[in-house]
Image (spheres, rainbow, N blue to C red):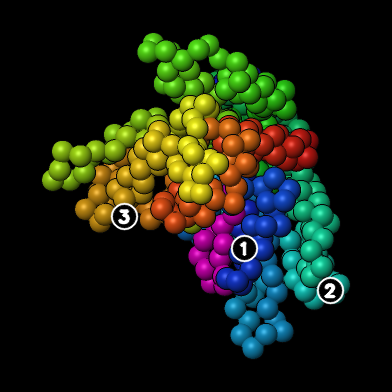
Amino acid sequence: MKYDKNIFFEIMRILINDFEDSKEQYFKTFGSFGYEDNEFIFCKSFESSRDFIVTHLESGKLPIDLIITNDSRDTDNDILKANQLSFFKNTLTTSYSKSNFRISSIPMILYSEAEEKSFEFQSSYNAIVKKNEYGEHSHFIRECERTIKDWRKLLYSDLETLEVKLEQLPNFINSDFFKRDYLRRISKNADHYFANKTKVVSTEFIKCPIVLNYDWLILDNKQIEESILKYIDTYKNHIKYDRKNGERAILHEFFKSHRTILLRDTYSDMKYELNLNELKSKDSEECDFILKTEYPDFLNTTFFEVKKEDVTFYVKKNSKRPQFSHDFFSHLKQVWGYKEFTKKPINKIELNSKLEYSTNNFDFILLAGRFEEKEEMRELFEPEIKRMFDGIKVITYEELEDVNINYLDKFNRLKI
């Protein structure tokens, strides 16, 4: 399919049913293989995982790529109920992800400390992985990615069974084949195709195939790589800043036309210079980019402020008390203003209206400066940010480059 830069993709999400205290370990484990925190949805019981499936997948028709569950049978309180969760999912015939796929097809991995090899367990999950207490998790990640890829291969097989080519989907329902043959031969027998001939597509999709907007189907690694190379060239070799060519003209325009650099497979949409007005006040906030999620109850909405790559972080570096530069301190205060805005209950209505959803989950990122200086001052940098602007994350242009290289590596590993 031809890539359209105005398409917003259905993106990577993993649901985890495990104990609350395991969350940071999952972040660390997946993070070492290029995954980002905002790709994971945590539920800490069978009931909450079941409710998530019903509310957000079955009713909300949102996407998910994989379910990982621990097993708590050997504890005093079996709150995870892994087998019940597997049975519940596997018996559903309803759809998710814009009604394209059947919930029962979602791959599921049992990830626990017990080494379970009974037939009951083996037949209930796509993979069973024993938790490694020694910190080596490459096998677990390989199994997660293999399971996701196996599911994706089944989708290609289903399309072949339905005699539909991926590139035909944008205009398929207007084609002569759909009107004269497909409707009569396949749509009218959708239940038969669902039960006997396909593995992952939903009844709705079988009846009326629609375009599948998923990055792994539409993008290729060359397109992502080209965006990364253009990003590097933009921050390293752009024309000299002046009144006409400032950060808006050079940096903002780049991010607007190369959205994957900010969105990757982590965010679903973005708003540019969204004006947020404070009620009963003339004050307002306008962050450069607000990165949105389709799961605001679980995942962060990110205020992302873009400043120049030549921002100097510190002055008087060789003195006893190095200080943040005036410009850097001003940028931090600006982002701090966004955080303060989101914390005021009076602004809830404005945020809900402009974001088009309600959430209390926010994070705040300032893109500025170069990694060399941040690394030079690393003993002071993060502690001082935390002390004065706790909750604000500062990333350099090189660090954003690394995030995107990790995304490309992961994309390549998962590509069919």
Q: Amino acid at mark 3?
A: Lys
Q: Nearer the viewer, mark 2 or mark 3?
A: 3
* Relative vertical location of residue 1 with respect to residue 279 in this rendering, above or below: above
Quadrant of residue 333 in the image?
top left
* Relative vertical location of residue 359 with respect to residue 216 in this rendering, above or below: below
Name the magenta segment's main secondary structure. Answer: helix
Q: Position of residue 203 (x, y in %)?
A: 60, 45
Quadrant in which the N terminus appears: top right
User: In this figure, what is the number of numbered marks?
Assistant: 3
**Whether label 2 touches label 3, CB < 8 Å:** no
Specify the label residue 115 is tagged with: 2
Q: Position of residue 81 (x, y in %)?
A: 64, 75
Q: Which residue is mark 3?
A: 343
Q: Which residue is mark 1?
A: 24
Q: Amino acid at mark 1?
A: Glu
Left or right, residue 398 beside residue 292: right
Q: Earlier in the sequence, mark 2 or mark 3?
A: 2
Q: Position of residue 189 (x, y in %)?
A: 65, 41
Judging depth in this view, the residue of 210 and 368 nearest the camera is 368
